[in-house]
Amino acid sequence: MIVSSTADRSIDPPLRVMALHALLYCERLFYLEEVEEIRVADANVYAGRRLHDDVAGLDDETPEKRSLELSSDQWGLFGKVDAVRRRDGKWVVYEHKRGRCRRGDNKEPLAWDSDRIQAVAYAVLLEEHFGESVPEARIRYHADKATAFVQIDQQARDDLRTAVTRADHLRNTVGRPAVTENERLCTRCSLAPVCLPEEERLLENRGETASDTSSPEAGAYPSNRERQTLHVTAQKAYVTRRGESLVVKTEEGDQVLPIEQVDTLVIHGHGQVTTQAIHLCAWKGVGIEWMSYGGRFTAGLTNSPGRVQQRIRQYRALARPDNCLRLAKALVHCKIENQLKYLLRSTRSEAAKREQIQPSIDRIRECVKKSSSSPSLETLRGLEGMAAKQYFAALPVLLGQSVPDELRPTGRTRRPPTDRFNALLSYGYSLIQATVHRSITEVGLEASLGFLHQPRSAAHPLVLDLMELFRTSLWEVPLIGSVNRLQWKTDEDFSIAGAQVWLSQEGRKKAIGLFEQRLQESYKHPLMGKSLTFARLVELEVRLLEKEWTESPGLFAQWRLR
C-alpha cells in the first residue's frame, strides 16, 4: 500500500529513503546509485534485505506492521520501513541492521548518521501516513545485539531537510563527487569495483603524476570473473528459456544453464534466440551478442540504463582535440610497446631469430619513442601503421620449424583473409571486439564516440580504440603458442572458398576455447598491485579510461606485457 500526502514538493522526482542512507554514508555512492543508476547487489546487500524476515520475530504483544510502503510529496520521499509497532500508545519505527552500532562516551549504543537519517525519514513519512506524532525510532544492530534510540524532534527534521536538499543538488550536477576520505567505508561498499577508490587515492598520493609506479595497498576490484560466457556455435541452435535458465537446443540435444552462471550469450552464425530468452537476459543483466558465420561482430545489446551524466562527460571530454591526442598517445604507446616486448621476449634465447628480426625491432623502437611526442592524430596513426607493418613482418619468425607451411602467413591480409594464419588472427580480433564492446556498454560509455579511430565504418570507434590495447596480449600471444604446439589441423579447422579462408565449425570452437582460456589467465596490473584475469583487465581499462575525464587522469593504458 502506498499513501501520499499533500503536494508541496512535486517538481523533482521522488527520492528513495535508502538513497538518503547512501548519501550520508558516501556522496559518491549516492551519485552512482541515484544519478547514474549503477546498482550492484552483492552478498551483503542481499543478506541485509533478508535480515528482518530471518531474525526479527513477530511481536505478539503490541500491534505491528511490517514492510509498510510510504511516500510523501511534501518531502519528496518514498520507501519501505522494516516495521512499526505501538509502544506506550505511540507508533515507533523499527529498523534492523546487520552491523555494529556506534558507541557513545559511556559506551551507550548510538545510531550511525546514515542509519539515523533513514530512521528519521521513515518516521516523518509515518506521521503523514497515520496523521499522528511519531516521537521515536529504534535501530536494532544485530552484530552486537544492541538497540539505538533516535528522537524525532525539530533537530532531526532539520537534518532530514538538509539531507534532502543536498541530494537534490547532487542530482542536478554532472560531475561525480570526490572519493570519500574515509577509506574504511570503501571496504564493504558494493560499488567499489565501479568507483575504484584505491586507484584515485593512488593518484592523489603521487601528486597527480603518472611516473610513479607504486601500487595501492589494497584494491576492491575483483580479480576473477564470477560468471562465464555462453558461446552458441551450432548453426541450427535454438536458445530459449526454462524458468531462470537458458536452454540451448541443438541436433545433439538440449543443454540447460542457470542464468546466474552466464555473463554474456554470444550467437555465432544463424542461431535463434526466443523473446522469452531475451527478456530473461535483460532482467538478469546478461548481454547478448551476435557474430557472423565468418566471425564478424554484428551487434550486441545490454539492459544498461542511459546514464546521461556519463555520456555528457564523455562527449565534453572527447570533443576536445587536446584530450583526444593525449589519450591516443597513451593508447598507441602502450600498443606498440607491448608488440616490441613480445618480439623481444619471444627471441630472448634464440640469437638467430633475434638477428633476423632486429631491423624490425629497431624501427618499432623508433616508433615507440616518437609516439609520446607526436604533434597530431594523423602523425600518431602513421607511427602506429609503421610499427604494425614491422611487427607483422617479424611475426612469422616466431613460428617453430615444425609448423606446416599452410599455417605460415604471407603478410597481413583481411576482409577476407587469404591464408589460415590470417583467418585465425581475424577471428580472434572479432572475439576481442565483442569483449571490449561488452565492457564498454557495461561501464556505460558511448561506443560511438572514440578518440583515435574515425567513424568510417559500422564498427564503433571507441571499441576499435580500446581493442588496440589487447590485440597482442589477448590473441596474438596465445595464438602463436597454439600454432607452435601444432594444435591446428590445416584441413579440418579451415574452410577454403577460392582465395578466401575461413574457420570451420571445429576451428571456431578451438578458437573460442583458446580465447576463453586466455581470458581466465591472470596478469599483474601495475596499478592494482595484484593479479587480475584478462577478462577483468579489459573492464578495468574501460573504467580507467572513464576516469580520464572524471578528474582522475593518468591511469589509463599504463599496463605492459612483461
Image (tube, grey):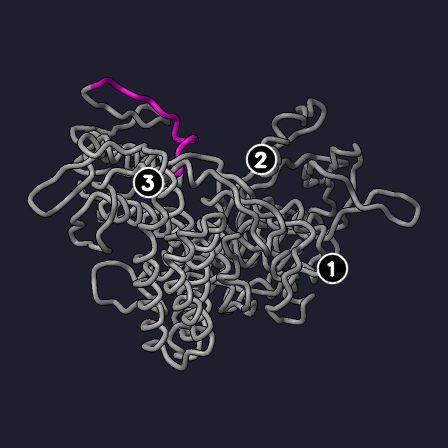
Q: Say what secondary structure mark 1 lies in.
A: helix
Camera-side mark, 1 or 3: 3
Please give the label number shown on residue 401: 3
Camera-side mark, 1 or 2: 2
- The image shows residue 439 at horizontal and vertical percentages of 40, 50
**Horizontal side, residue 140 vs residue 307: left or right:** right
* Looking at the image, residue 58 lies above or below residue 467: above
Cα–Cα span, label 1 and label 2 = 37 Å
Q: Which residue is mark 1?
A: 154
Q: Nearer the viewer, residue 24 or 478?
A: 478
Q: Residue furthest left?
A: 498
Count neighbours of disc 1 (C-alpha within 10 A) and say few if under 14, some if 14 to 19, many if 20 or more.
Answer: few
- The residue at the point 80 percent across, 35 percent down is 146
Q: Say what secondary structure mark 2 lies in.
A: helix
* Looking at the image, residue 526 lies above or below residue 9: above
Q: Nearer the viewer, residue 549 or 294?
A: 294
Q: Which residue is mark 2?
A: 43
* Looking at the image, residue 356 lies above or below residue 252: below
Looking at the rendering, the stretch of residues picked out in magenta corresponds to 252-265
Residue 376 sits in quarter = bottom left
